[in-house]
Image (cartoon, rainbow, N blue to C red):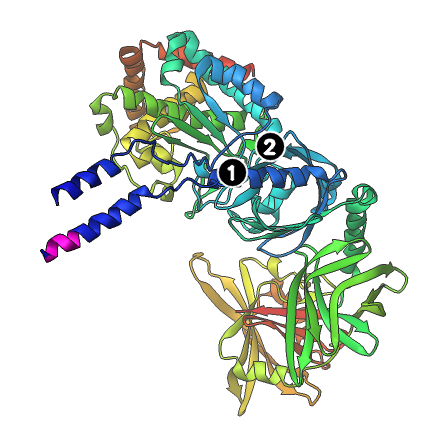
């Protein structure tokens, strides 16, 4: 009896379930809502008579500007500041489609695809990866004048802003001119580039090829670095993430002008006058850096081309020595007369081509100054130096044992630079 | 109890249509342009071949970084395919041959597909239905080397369809030894010395067979002879045995005069 009761209950449950009416309200079926969303997005894209200004931030770094004009027949006309030749308008196709989410696809090749081209000679990124950018985006946030999209594969960010007629005419020309002005950065042949805003000064590292900028600052006595992507804007750059430290907050460089006579950039930062100039020494020296680096260094550090001088890599033509592999720096290589000495070893590929050999090297005693320099005092050479190597070896020795010594600039966990304290125009890049 | 069960049966015996959603998540629709119309007239109508040129992630490997095709490359590429692959076969084997056997879909990709082992993929085929062609953005009719490279892929994949439809004679498999999955670790010279026309031909007898057909067609008889003559003397008879089987296979299986097809293909490439 009890079983029957249970069964009855169960059946009743079924009966109710079967009576249910699951028909959604008209126009509310998923495919109807998706299709409606897609047509609304498209309507918005084509609604802007002068198109959209846009900035794409690939996952791989950098920021690139575009002007898009979407048309009803699923075509898009674009120009960009990726390189000098992308300022010319180019037509390609787009379509709206539901992938995981409603998406905007740029589905034939355009300037945008240069960044994700797996051919490294096209993208300037890595083989098989490009700059880890996207050309298929889903709608993340939509307001009437700003559309934020996220790359479906690499999560790159693309922000579209409704353009005015004036912007449609001048936007790409303006940012391209700005990029060309910043190309003057290559005139700085010193290691240190200093941004001065009032009484604040920071060493910066400006990488226009990858559109990334690094600020060096101090937290107490500890040096820190902050790196972010930037995009060019008319007369300046816009940072992806603001740099906020040491009492300043920098979101952009504005009203930038290059003064060729003074080899200096004049600009404003948050309305305040500022300059960028090359410098002979760091804005602030980390006095512990050289000693700490030296004390930690048991392994050797590699320098594939030796010294860079006045912006010229491999200034002593080490790579022209037959079978030259790299210059290697050993801190505390060995002991001579109870004093530890360092070695700059010349590594070569052996005759059989299957191993490295260290036929000779330069030895020097390191000393550390109170103001944070490391000075190498010449001790002599180890091994036998072939006659035809003499010139390169002597020049390297002379540079290395400059009595002014070097600042040690730690650029990452596995990279550092020994920068001449004489004028900041010579440095030895090190990596491990 | 019985009564209840009957109620259940009737109530659930459905009288209305199942409420299946007709969700079409992939409405690949766009306003057809001049290019779409050209493809319909030249490939869909005569051969029932669809040419996908707008990037479709679902047709491709998801773990590869790829770039779409440039629109202005599509017609030159497809004209070339028609002129140097379809037309010679049609002339030799009749108009139904291509209609019956051709892959039904070409997918065009602008960039190469970069593999983890340092090689790149120029083309792939799936079950005789779909051919994916990469590196379309570098295509130019005047670059005969690149034209041959692309045709290499198509002839290669089409030859797979042929032997998957009618198998080639088994003795072919025993002519060369040294098939290996790590074919790219060995030099072309080493492959030639074992009677393999390309490095990739080493990967399996099937690949060997279609590489032979493809190279013989894209290089022509003279070009093929030159390759054979450049191979070590002991390998040359192996190539001649393979050549003979290929020619006989085309005659027996498809009633095609291979040497005539070879000449037509060469003329087409030369007059492109």
The label number, if any, that marks residue B70 in the structure image = 2
Q: Are marks 1 and 2 on the same chain?
A: no
Q: Is residue A187 visible?
A: yes
Residue extending farthest to the right is A261
How many marks are shown on the rendered structure? 2
CA–CA distance in space, label 1 to label 2: 38 Å
A152 or B146, which lies in front? A152
Q: Are marks 1 and 2 in contact (CB under 8 Å)?
A: no
**Which stretch is magenta?**
A2-7
- The residue that appears at 62% across and 21% down in the rendered structure is B34
A361 or A426, which lies in front? A426
Q: Is residue A425 visible?
A: no
* Residue A287, percent from left and from top: 67, 85
* Residue A233, percent from left and from top: 77, 54
* Residue A344, percent from left and from top: 57, 74
Give the side of residue B210 with respect to residue A15, left or right: right
Image quarter hosting the N terminus of chain A: bottom left
> Which residue is label 1 attached to?
A27
Give the side of residue A422 with respect to residue B230, left or right: right
- The residue that appears at 38% across and 32% down in the rendered structure is B198
Q: Main secondary structure of the magenta part?
A: helix
Q: Is residue A303 magenta?
A: no
For residue A319, what is the image quadrant? bottom right
Q: Is residue A5 magenta?
A: yes
Q: Chain of mark 1?
A: A
For residue B249, what is the image quadrant? top left
């Amino acid at each position: 009896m009890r079983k029957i009761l249970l069964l009855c209950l169960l059946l009743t449950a079924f009966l109710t379930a079967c009576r249910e009416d699951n028909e959604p309200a008209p126009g509310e079926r998923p495919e109807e809502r998706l299709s409606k969303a897609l047509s609304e997005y498209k309507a918005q894209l084509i609604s802007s008579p002068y198109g959209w200004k846009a900035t794409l931030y690939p996952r791989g770094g950098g920021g690139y500007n575009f002007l898009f004009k979407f048309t009803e027949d699923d075509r898009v006309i674009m120009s960009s500041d990726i390189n000098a030749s992308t300022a010319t308008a180019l037509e390609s196709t787009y379509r709206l489609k539901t992938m995981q989410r409603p998406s905007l696809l740029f589905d034939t090749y355009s300037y945008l695809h240069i960044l994700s081209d797996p051919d490294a000679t096209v993208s300037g990124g890595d083989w098989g990866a490009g700059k880890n950018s996207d050309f298929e985006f889903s709608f993340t946030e939509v307001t009437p004048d700003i559309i934020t999209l996220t790359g479906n594969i690499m999560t790159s960010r693309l922000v579209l802003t409704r353009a005015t007629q004036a912007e449609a005419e001048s936007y790409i020309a303006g940012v391209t001119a700005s990029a060309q002005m910043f190309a003057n950065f290559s005139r700085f042949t010193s290691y240190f580039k200093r941004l001065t805003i009032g009484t604040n000064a920071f060493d910066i590292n400006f990488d226009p090829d990858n559109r990334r900028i690094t600020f060096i600052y101090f937290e107490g006595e500890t040096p820190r670095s902050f790196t972010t992507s930037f995009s060019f804007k008319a007369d300046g750059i816009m940072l992806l993430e603001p740099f906020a430290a040491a009492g300043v907050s920098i979101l952009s460089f504005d009203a930038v002008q290059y003064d060729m006579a003074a080899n200096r950039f004049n600009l404003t930062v948050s309305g305040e006058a500022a300059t960028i100039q090359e410098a002979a020494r760091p804005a602030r020296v980390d006095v512990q850096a050289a000693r700490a680096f030296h004390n930690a260094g048991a392994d050797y550090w590699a320098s594939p081309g030796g010294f860079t001088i006045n912006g010229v890599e491999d200034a002593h033509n080490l790579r022209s020595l037959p079978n030259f592999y790299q210059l290697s720096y050993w801190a505390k290589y060995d002991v001579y007369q109870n004093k530890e000495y360092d070695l700059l070893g010349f590594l070569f590929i052996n005759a059989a081509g299957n191993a490295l050999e260290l036929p000779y090297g330069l030895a020097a005693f390191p000393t550390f100054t109170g103001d944070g320099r490391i000075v190498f005092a010449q001790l002599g050479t180890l091994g036998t130096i072939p006659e035809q190597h003499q010139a390169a070896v002597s020049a390297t020795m002379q540079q290395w044992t400059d009595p002014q010594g070097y600042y040690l600039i730690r650029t990452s966990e596995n990279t550092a630079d020994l920068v001449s304290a004489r004028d900041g125009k010579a440095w030895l890049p090190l990596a491990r | 109890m019985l009564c209840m069960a009957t109620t259940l049966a009737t109530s659930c015996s459905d009288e209305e249509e199942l409420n299946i959603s007709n969700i079409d998540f992939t409405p690949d629709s766009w306003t057809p342009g001049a290019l779409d119309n050209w493809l319909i007239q030249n490939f869909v109508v005569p051969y029932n071949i669809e040419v996908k040129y707008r990037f479709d992630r679902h047709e491709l490997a998801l773990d590869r970084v790829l770039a779409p095709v440039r629109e202005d490359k599509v017609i030159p590429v497809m004209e070339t395919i028609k002129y140097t692959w379809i037309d010679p076969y049609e002339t030799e084997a009749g108009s139904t041959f291509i209609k019956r056997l051709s892959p039904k879909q070409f997918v065009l990709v602008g960039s190469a597909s970069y593999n983890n082992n340092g090689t790149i993929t120029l083309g792939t085929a799936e079950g005789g239905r779909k051919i994916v062609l990469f590196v379309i953005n570098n295509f130019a009719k005047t670059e005969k080397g690149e034209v041959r490279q692309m045709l290499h892929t198509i002839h290669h994949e089409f030859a797979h369809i042929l032997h998957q439809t009618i198998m080639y004679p088994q003795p072919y498999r025993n002519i060369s030894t040294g098939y290996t999955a790590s074919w790219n670790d060995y030099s072309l010279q080493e492959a030639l010395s074992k009677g393999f026309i390309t490095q990739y031909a080493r990967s399996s007898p099937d690949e060997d067979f279609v590489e032979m057909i493809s190279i013989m067609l894209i290089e022509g008889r003279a070009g093929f002879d030159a390759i054979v003559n450049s191979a070590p003397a002991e390998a040359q008879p192996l190539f001649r045995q393979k050549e003979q089987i290929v020619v006989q296979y085309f005659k027996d299986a498809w009633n095609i005069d291979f040497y005539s097809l070879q000449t037509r293909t060469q003329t087409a490439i030369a007059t492109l």
